[in-house]
Amino acid sequence: MKNLFKSVVTVIAIIFSLSNQAQTKSPKLENSLLWEVSGNGLEKPSYLYGTIHVICGEDYFLSEKTKKAFEASGKLVLEMNYADPNEMEFMQKSAMGKEPLSKKLNPEQLAKLDAILKKSTGMTIKQVDAFTLMTVSGLISMKNFGCTDMKFYEMEFAAMAKKRNIEVVGLETVKFQIESYGNAYSDDETIAMSEEADDDTDLSVANYKKENIEELYKASTAADIMTAKAKKYMLDERNSKWVEVLPELMKKESLFVGVGAAHLGGEFGVINLLRKAGYIVKPIMN
């Protein structure tokens, strides 16, 4: 349980990477995880990078173009501030449920979750009874990666920012992210996602390594999970709020913005919303 608690940051990151599914109606995006944002009065360009959040160490990569963009930026902007100890403490505390899962879930839900746990992790519901359903779902997903040396892109970026002594800013708080997830998914939907979590992991990693944004959409979209309600809370509303915050920050200095790759594309994705706001957003290919 101690090791599980230390993995809370990774667990929650995985949950959000699996939940960030979308459908795109906007023009097809080029194969690039890195995008330059310029124009609309900006004195210096900023950079937008799509992360997969968590990946096995052997698959982890950071291209030279991304390193150059990071070095050219004066501030790191992430979905939430992983360099803030208060935020990290809140995240760890949030892993624990307000009541045991054995009381929160009905017998049918408990039995289903117990079976998924045993199959994916070798653990039982009793061993994770004190944690939230969201945390347990993340643990199951983490096991499906099939490795123990996991790399977390946002934490890597935060470490790079510390080394350069540049500020890290969060677009939203841990509390807001957890509330968004709670609004998006019912207990039954979270359990369903846990059961299906291993289906697209390998394909998503493969497409991520190819920087194929369009295929990442297809690999992560599940119509029976990504309801209109979930899309509203997990993607559309968050993207819109970020695009309201970013212009003021970009006016002051060049930013390196790292968010989940699923937030980049789609009609209401960050790239399209920034373009609609008057910015030039183009892929950096090499």
Image (cartoon, rainbow, N blue to C red):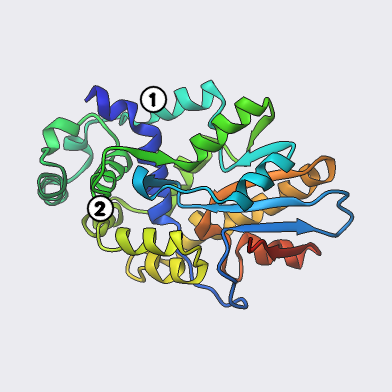
Residue 73 place in picture, x, y as percent: 73, 41
Q: Amino acid at mark 2?
A: Ser
Q: What SS does tag 2 mark?
A: helix
Q: What SS does tag 1 mark?
A: helix
Q: Residues within 10 Å of mark 1 (few under 14, many from 20)?
A: few
- Quick check: 145 above or below 174? below
Rendered image quadrant of residue 171: top right
Say which quadrant the N terminus sits in.
Answer: top left
Residue at the spot of label 2: 194
For the point 23% across and 48% down, the residue is: 146
Residue 34 place in picture, x, y as percent: 62, 57
For the point 72% across and 63% down, the residue is: 281
Residue at the spot of label 1: 93
Sequence-wise, the earlier of marks 1 and 2 is 1
Rendered image quadrant of residue 160: top right
Camera-side residue: 162 or 128?
162
Q: Is residue 163 left or right of residue 251?
A: left
- Quick check: 123 above or below 20? above
Q: Is residue 68 left or right of residue 117?
A: right
Camera-side residue: 246 or 48?
48
